[in-house]
Image (tube, rainbow, N blue to C red):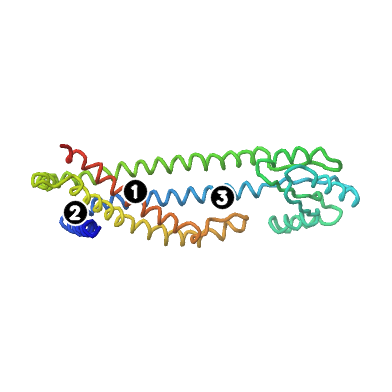
Amino acid sequence: MATMIRTFFSHVLESIKSLKRNGWMTIASASAVTITLVLVGLFMAVIFNATKLAKDIEENVTVSVFVDIGTTPDEMQQLEKELNKIDNVETISYSNKDKQLEKIQKQMGEAWNLFEGDSNPLYDVYYVSAKEPSDTKKISEKAATLANVFKADYGGVSSDKIFSIAGKVRTWGLGAAILLLFVAVFLISNTIRITILSRQREIQIMRLVGAKNGYIRWPFFIEGAWIGLIGAIIPILVLTFGYQKFYTLFNPQLLSSNYSLLKPESFVWQIDLLMIVIGMTIGSLGSIISMRRFLKI
């Protein structure tokens, strides 16, 4: 055990020396890692937030049930009971036509003051939200058949498009992220391969003096991990501080529409950790894959 520990630290020291001896190639390899991980980090942040916003949009789609003009209070109570009986209804809220007019007046200005009182052309409305966004259409169709309902609307084609886009963001976003990781493996492995090629003579000498493949491979394996770790530093800083700034600037605007970005503290550290793991893993594997041709007997 003691021998294995000494050998491991010997390989670590050798890998650090090798990084210094091959300074320019180390910088080139680390730069490839940096560029790729910046793209991976930014892309993953976009995917996570796009999925979050798509979910927010889905959850904010509600059925607007417009009540017939002249409906009595007793009929209103009966209608609310019938709405509550519809399958998969989660919440029901009520807004009378005067409140509807106030909202429009705030957005559109004083021109709508002419419609106050008996001139108000709007309807009393029940807002019905579904337990699952996909149930919204069925609830709308059922509510439209109830007594004293003028119409039930959930956005129709527009909301159907929202649901479709939300699904595509999750599916294609995940696929694109995986594809980008494969591209990262290819780019980093090939850059490290150039580093190995530049040290072909060093590897040949080690084999001539009888060094085993494992002994030759370990310093390069650890060196690849160092390159991956070094290359991950800038992407981590870019994502950590850049996303915090982006969140501060844009999230208040989204909150006004009942949407929000992911909080930095909730997921940035996870992506940072993932980039370290990806960088070190790809760096190490890239070194091993690139060395295979030189270690064949």
Residue 99 pos. (x, y %): 78, 57
Identify which residue is drawn at 39% across, 43% down: 180
Q: Point out the tag, 2 or 3, that comes first from the N-terminus.
A: 2
User: Which residue is nearer to you in this view: 287 or 5?
Assistant: 5
Tell me the residue that label 1 is attached to.
Answer: 36
Residue 245 shows which numbered tag?
none
The residue that disc 2 covers is 24
Q: Label 3 amino acid? A: Leu
| Label 2, label 3: how far apart the Cα atoms are | 43 Å
Q: Position of residue 29 (x, y in %)?
A: 25, 50
Q: Mark 3 — residue? A: 53
Where is residue 249 shown, x and y percent of the image?
50, 61
Left or right relative to 256: residue 188: left
Where does the N terminus fall, quadrant-wise?
bottom left
User: Which residue: 79% across, 39% down?
Assistant: 144
Displayed quadrant of residue 9 = bottom left
The amino acid marked with disc number 2 is Trp
Residue 189 shown left or right of residue 257 in the figure: left
